[in-house]
Image: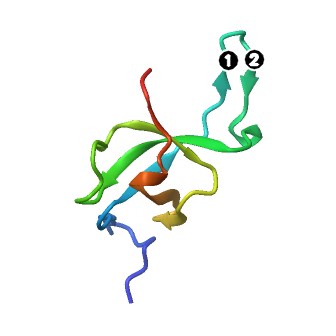
Amino acid sequence: MIDEHSPGLNLSLDPLDDYVVIQPSDEETETRAGLIIPASAENSCRSGVVTAVGNDADSIEPGDKVLFPKDAGYEVRLAGTAIRVIRRRELIARIHD
């Protein structure tokens, strides 16, 4: 039996079809007025960085920063890190810094 926490084990996740893998951001958001909103206080949306895309996920690439609904897709733990696997059509927007 292979344990995902074993030293030297390299895990990866390749999404199928139109699924996208996102590393959610736990950063605080600062508004133009200087108000800081912690990620835990955001009600309906989250942001994150795309780490992998399926073959049918059009117009999105690894490294893109995106906005998605808080409850979209599936939360998965991979080697102790929480990631989201969601369908491409559930993405709301691409964020340009």
Q: Tell me which corner region of the image, top left, top right, bottom left or bottom right, holds residue 2.
A: bottom left
- The answer to whether marks 1 and 2 mark residues whose Cβ atoms lie closer than 8 Å is yes
Q: Quadrant of the N terminus?
A: bottom left
> Could you say where residue 8 lies in the image, as x and y percent from the top left?
32, 66
Residue bearing the label numbered 1? 31
The kind of residue on which mark 1 rests is Thr
Q: Residues within 10 Å of mark 2 (few under 14, many from 20)?
A: few
> Residue at 33% across / 60% down in the picture?
18
The kind of residue on which mark 2 rests is Leu
In the displayed orientation, state which residue is furthest to the top: 33
> Could you say where residue 91 lies in the image, as x and y percent from the top left?
47, 47
Residue bearing the label numbered 2? 35
Element type where label 1 sits in the image: loop
> Could you say where residue 45 lies in the image, as x and y percent from the top left?
63, 42
> Residue at 65% across / 26% down in the picture?
29
> Residue at 33% across / 38% down in the picture?
63
Left or right of 81 on screen, residue 69: right
